[in-house]
């Protein structure tokens, strides 16, 4: 997570969207209204489930040689052509998937005063509020967010860990440990699809940085005018997204210059390649732009984990992936520099 900037940032008034929803204003405040004609349009034919690759993780870990090879090819294709895939049989207990969702939802349902005990200071990314607001005239997302730094321990801010719901902290810790293992394992299989040794990322990353962000988008009567999350790519190496069971379909990814909706699969996790992995692989694997839309009547919860190298590590395309036919496409930088640049 980015360090706190030294100069104070003016972000203007930020409405809490859950409170706005309750107040039922006749018009949507201007800062939330987007120009939907700008940029790519929605894909007309919805991609079918089989389009966004599905990776059966247990076949990578425990499958026969053939299973492994088929799944590994599918993983390579997903990283190269989509930058996104859904992982099934990921090994994380269903009860844990349900528990994190429950504590997240219960947190967002608390009264505003309770949530505001953990405010996200302007220009920072931990706590309750809207992340990535850096100016007074910037558009706002129709979404409430709550974010915490998890690892290494020095990025934790204990004052921002909610005491309500009672099981919140404990559940976030247990869940984050499981997701960390999944990220480490996925990175091993991803390394192997590139012909690299399995531990290459683990060795390179040092003590990886991990953060969690919960996004809650209430319904919006004018969902045609607002966005749950603005288009962006993730700075991480890998991102793990859990979509709330029964939530509205909201995530869209840029594919062939059209927004393609990601249809939730129950108990699956959505994984995407972040900018860091795109740089390390010299652009072979893609960090794809994505956004979230809202729904007229249904709310949407998502729980997102970002996994990235230590801030101190200098990153650039891996020498193994640079040659005469694949010249170096990115300059070297540290993860900290990159974060400063982005935030
Ligand atoms: C994010 C993100 C998508 C979602 O938090 O970076 O892209 O569906 N979230 O919440
Ligand atoms: Ni994202």
Image (tube, helix red, strand yellow):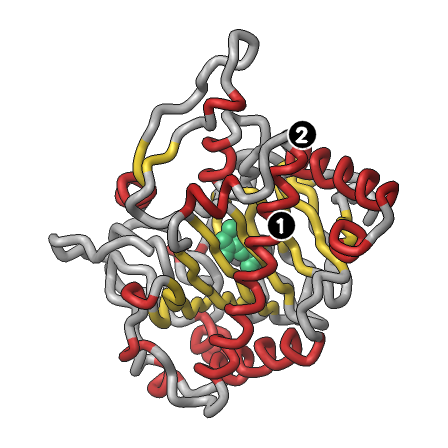
User: In this rendering, is residue 14 above or below 316?
Assistant: below
- Name the N-terminal-most of marks 2 and 1: 1
Q: Viewed as shown, does residue 270 lie left or right of 337?
A: right
C-alpha span from label 2 to label 1: 26 Å
Tell which of 122 and 23 is nearer to you. 122
Secondary structure state at the residue bearing disc 1: helix
Tell which of 157 and 218 is nearer to you. 157
| Dot in front, 2 or 1 | 1
Secondary structure state at the residue bearing disc 2: loop
Residue 225: tell me if it is visible. Answer: no
Q: Residues within 10 Å of mark 1 (few under 14, many from 20)?
A: many
Q: Viewed as shown, does residue 47 lie left or right of 308?
A: right
Question: Which percent across, then down, holds residue 4?
Answer: 21, 57
Tell which of 79 and 250 is nearer to you. 79
User: In this rendering, is residue 168 above or below 138?
Assistant: below
Question: Which percent across, then down, holds residue 181?
Answer: 57, 61
Residue located at (59% from left, 42% from top): 198
Residue located at (39% from left, 71% from top): 16
Q: Viewed as shown, does residue 302 lie left or right of 249?
A: left
Residue located at (44% from left, 82% from top): 169
Residue located at (50% from left, 74% from top): 21
Q: Which residue is mark 2?
A: 256
Question: Which percent across, then down, holds residue 321?
Answer: 53, 22
- Residue 186 has which mark? 1
- The picture quadrant where one finds residue 287 is top right
- The picture quadrant where one finds residue 244 is bottom right
């Amino acid at each position: 997570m980015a360090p706190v900037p030294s100069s104070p940032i003016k972000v203007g008034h930020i409405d809490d969207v859950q409170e706005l929803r309750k107040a039922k204003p006749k018009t949507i405040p201007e800062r939330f209204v987007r120009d939907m004609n700008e940029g790519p349009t929605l894909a007309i034919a919805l991609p079918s489930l089989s389009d966004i690759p599905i990776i059966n993780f247990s076949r990578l870990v425990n499958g026969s040689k053939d299973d492994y090879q088929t799944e590994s090819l599918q993983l390579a294709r997903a990283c190269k052509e989509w930058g996104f895939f859904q992982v099934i049989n990921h090994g994380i207990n269903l009860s844990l998937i349900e528990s994190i969702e429950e504590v997240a939802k219960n947190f967002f349902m608390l009264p505003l005063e309770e949530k505001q005990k953990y405010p996200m200071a302007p220009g920072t990314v931990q706590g309750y509020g809207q992340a990535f607001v850096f100016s007074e005239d910037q558009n706002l997302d129709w979404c409430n967010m709550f974010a915490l730094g998890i690892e290494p321990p020095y990025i934790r801010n204990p004052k921002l860990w909610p005491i309500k719901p009672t099981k919140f902290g404990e559940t976030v810790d247990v869940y984050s440990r499981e997701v960390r293992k999944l990220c480490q394992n996925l990175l091993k299989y991803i390394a192997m699809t590139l012909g690299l040794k399995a531990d290459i990322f683990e060795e390179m990353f040092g003590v990886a940085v991990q953060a969690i962000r919960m996004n809650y988008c209430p319904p919006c009567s004018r969902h045609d005018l607002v966005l749950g999350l603005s288009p962006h790519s993730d700075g991480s190496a890998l991102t793990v997204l859990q979509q709330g069971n029964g939530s509205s379909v909201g995530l869209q990814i840029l594919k062939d210059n059209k927004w393609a909706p990601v249809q939730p699969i129950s108990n699956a996790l959505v994984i995407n390649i972040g900018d860091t992995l795109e740089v390390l692989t010299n652009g072979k694997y893609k960090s794809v732009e994505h956004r979230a839309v809202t729904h007229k009547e249904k709310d949407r919860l998502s729980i997102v984990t970002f996994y990235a190298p230590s801030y101190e590590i200098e990153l650039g395309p891996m020498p193994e992936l640079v040659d005469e036919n694949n010249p170096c496409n990115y300059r070297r930088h540290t993860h900290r520099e990159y974060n400063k640049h982005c935030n």
